[in-house]
């Protein structure tokens, strides 16, 4: 087990009120302000407690399966003919994605706070599954909110959550996707705040969530950095991760933020192309605003209404993004780019056929950009790509696109 | 702006002199359309509303229950914007210069417009106060300064979870009135435990801030009568919208106004006027 450094030097933000520069903060109805304060205090106590860290690290090792491998994709590298392509295998975690790193951590905080009921929102269903999983393990009641459109495209994950004993609530309001699931989870939390812990799955929401979720995901980058030094003999030249809310990306990026020679790229969902308006790329084509408790880049119209997003990947189909990404964009440290549905699909097939690894459609966005980048680089360079999840859940979507019924 | 009328304060003074508790009605602007809203505003005043709260439609009304969510969706189906809502208030002001109007909504449409432009447009339209659900006092420095500069009141929510320190801070930041959310939950949900509400409201009134209104979870004339006996104002929203949507066109407006008439009668009886 690699040592987890939760207090990395890049962790000086947010400030005490949860701001990353102009972004972040706590924009919620008054009913939630005091519960958020209690969460801040409970989390700070956990963070400072060596016993908590010890339990967390043991769970990450024995339950999640960390450290996850760093894999040099040799055939893919050869095919692309540029920089060496390294994959951080978060897809090999228990439940098949990076989401479990965070739910294991938050569930431990919930247990410390004496909360008996867990709620969560989910888009692709990976966070819902990861939440239902830890709830089952701790014997906690679990309710997962999911947009009815996502329930249709991710029926396998819905069934997995039900097998794990969770109640999956179909959300019919608004665009019936992740943002509406998050609205509904917030409404549940307001009404049941005494006994309920809300496990947010990404680095968005009101403070302290963007900070707390980041801290639980930082292990991705910390491990990757040490693995690159050991296996590659140096740091990567470029680091790439997909960004919906942005939790795997923040987790991957943090360990490299101070390494100025490392270029960092966050890949948003370009959908049909950002010029069509049908996409989910707020950092590339949105404007700052306030949604779900924080100020950040949003997909919105001229009247400040949140607009519907589109991505082939349910996990990236979100009109906002974690506030720290907004700050990293403005500071110029991270470059944010986008990849269309078609490009992501091509990358999905390429990785599957060359390496026998089926990436999640979310991670396929990072793959597509990482491969493009590698092709433009020289053979003595290296690209590190976060393979945030596996593609089993997406097989139906892929089959449907090919006109095949599975 | 020093010349601005303080309609909300005037309203509470007048009611206090009459021994009455204020009835504040909430409807979503543009539900189902702006003409209906305008007519409804006159009818609600006629039926006994003292202060009108107008909901500004938003795509993600996180603090609202299904009734107000759907009202938002009906208004947004024909793109009712914050600018449209202010035009609606301006039209209402040509007929009614007396009744205070408070805009209640979410922060993003105001952020998009910009605080300065919003404040001046609201003032020009004849808006008296603004309640932004997802703007807690801690984040509100610039917002309050900008709105109060043009004489707009900033109403803030106090919740059952707020506790003494936050309640004092919120009371100090609130102007026009202080809005006590009587239940842990969204609008139009469960019924409040009124004996507990009474205790909290009496505590809030002792903080030396603006008059204290109570809302979320008050739906019937009976509820309103109980709360009117110990609060400065009673806020009813979802129950009125339910009446409005119970029948199309004029019949819906009539049903909503009828409920407001019953609320008025029950509240006045409860305080002995």
Image (tube, rainbow, N blue to C red):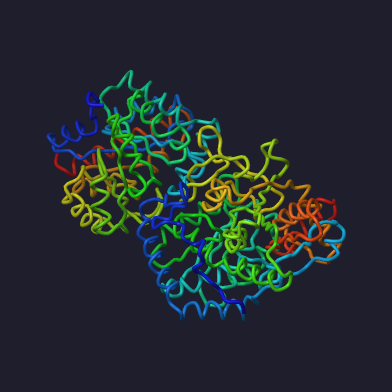
| Residue A84 sits in quarter | bottom right
> Looking at the figure, which quarter contains the C terminus of chain A?
bottom right
For image coordinates 44% across by 27% down, the residue present is B36
Residue B86, located in which quarter of the rendered image?
Answer: top left
- Between B238 and B75, the one lying in front of the other is B75
State which quarter of the image contains the N terminus of chain A: bottom right
- Taking the image as shown, residue A349 lies to the left or right of residue A29, namely right
Task: Work out whether B66 lies above or below A259.
Answer: above
Does residue B39 appear left or right of residue A365 in this picture?
A: left
- A182 and A388: which one is in front? A388
Q: Is residue A109 above or below residue B224?
A: below
**Residue at coordinates 41% horizontally, 47% vertically from top-left?**
B134
Q: Is residue A6 left or right of residue A96?
A: left
| Picture residue at 55% right of the left edge, 43% below the top | A298
Which residue is painted at 62% across and 40% down in the image?
A: A285
Residue A251 position within the rendered picture, expressed as x and y whole percent measured from the top left: 59, 63
Residue A359 shows in the view? yes
Q: Position of residue B27 (x, y in %)?
A: 39, 36
Where residue A315 appears, x then y in whole percent? Answer: 65, 55
Question: Residue B106: x, y in percent?
Answer: 43, 42
Q: Residue furthest top?
A: B94
């Amino acid at each position: 087990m690699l040592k987890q450094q939760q207090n990395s030097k890049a962790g000086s933000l947010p400030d005490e009120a949860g701001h990353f520069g102009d972004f972040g903060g706590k924009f919620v109805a008054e009913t939630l302000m005091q519960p958020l304060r209690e969460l801040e205090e409970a989390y700070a106590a956990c963070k400072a407690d060596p016993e908590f860290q010890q339990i967390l690290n043991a769970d990450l090792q024995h339950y999640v399966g960390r450290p996850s491998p760093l894999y040099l994709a040799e055939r893919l590298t050869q095919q692309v003919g540029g920089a060496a392509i390294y994959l951080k295998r978060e897809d090999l975690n228990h439940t098949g994605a990076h989401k479990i790193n965070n739910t294991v951590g938050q569930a431990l905080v919930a247990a410390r706070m004496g909360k008996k009921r867990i709620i969560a929102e989910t888009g692709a269903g990976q966070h819902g599954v990861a939440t239902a999983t830890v709830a089952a393990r701790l014997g906690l009641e679990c309710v997962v909110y999911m947009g009815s459109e996502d329930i249709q495209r991710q029926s396998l994950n819905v069934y997995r959550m039900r097998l794990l004993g969770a109640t999956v609530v179909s959300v019919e309001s608004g665009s019936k996707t992740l943002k509406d699931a998050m609205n509904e989870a917030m409404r549940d939390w307001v009404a049941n705040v005494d006994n309920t812990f809300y496990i947010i799955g990404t680095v968005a929401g009101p403070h302290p969530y963007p900070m707390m979720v980041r801290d639980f995901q930082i292990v991705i980058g910390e491990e990757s950095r040490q693995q690159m030094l050991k296996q590659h003999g140096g740091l990567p030249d470029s680091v790439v991760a997909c960004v919906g809310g942005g939790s795997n990306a923040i987790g991957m990026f943090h360990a490299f933020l101070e390494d100025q020679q490392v270029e960092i790229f966050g890949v948003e969902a370009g959908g049909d192309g950002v010029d069509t308006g049908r996409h989910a790329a707020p950092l590339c084509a949105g404007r700052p605003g306030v949604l779900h408790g924080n100020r950040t880049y949003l997909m919105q119209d001229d009247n400040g209404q949140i607009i519907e997003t589109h991505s082939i990947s349910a996990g990236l189909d979100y009109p906002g993004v974690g506030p720290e990404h907004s700050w990293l964009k403005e500071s110029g440290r991270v470059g944010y780019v986008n990849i269309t549905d078609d490009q992501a699909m091509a990358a999905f097939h390429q990785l599957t056929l060359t390496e026998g690894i089926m990436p999640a459609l979310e991670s396929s966005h990072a793959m597509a950009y990482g491969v493009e980048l590698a092709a433009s680089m020289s053979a003595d360079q290296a690209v590190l790509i976060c393979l945030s999840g596996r593609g089993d859940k997406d097989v139906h979507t892929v089959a449907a696109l090919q006109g095949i019924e599975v | 702006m020093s010349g601005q009328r303080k309609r909300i304060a005037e309203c509470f003074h007048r009611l206090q002199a009459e021994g009455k508790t204020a009835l504040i009605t909430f409807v979503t602007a543009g539900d189902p359309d702006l003409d209906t809203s305008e007519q409804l505003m006159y009818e609600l005043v006629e039926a006994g509303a003292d202060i009108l709260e107008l909901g500004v439609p938003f795509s993600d009304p996180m603090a609202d229950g299904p009734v107000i969510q759907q009202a938002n969706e009906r208004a947004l189906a024909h793109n009712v914007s914050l600018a449209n809502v202010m035009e609606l208030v301006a039209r209402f002001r040509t007929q009614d210069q007396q009744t205070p109007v408070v805009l209640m909504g979410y922060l993003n449409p105001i952020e998009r417009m910009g605080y300065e432009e919003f404040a001046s447009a609201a003032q020009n339209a004849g808006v008296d106060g603004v309640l932004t659900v997802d703007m807690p006092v801690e984040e509100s420095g610039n917002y309050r300064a900008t709105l109060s500069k043009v004489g707009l009141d900033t109403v803030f929510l106090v919740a059952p979870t707020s506790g003494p320190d936050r309640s004092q801070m919120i009371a100090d930041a609130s102007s026009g009135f202080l809005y006590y959310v009587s239940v842990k939950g969204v609008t139009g949900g469960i019924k409040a435990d009124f004996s507990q509400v009474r205790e909290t409201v009496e505590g809030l009134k002792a903080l030396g801030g603006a008059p204290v209104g109570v809302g979320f979870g008050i739906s019937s004339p009976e509820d309103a009568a109980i709360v009117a006996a110990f609060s400065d104002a009673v806020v009813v929203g979802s129950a009125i919208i339910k009446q409005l949507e119970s029948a199309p066109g004029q019949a819906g407006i009539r049903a909503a106004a009828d409920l407001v008439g019953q609320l008025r009668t029950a509240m006045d009886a409860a305080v002995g006027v």
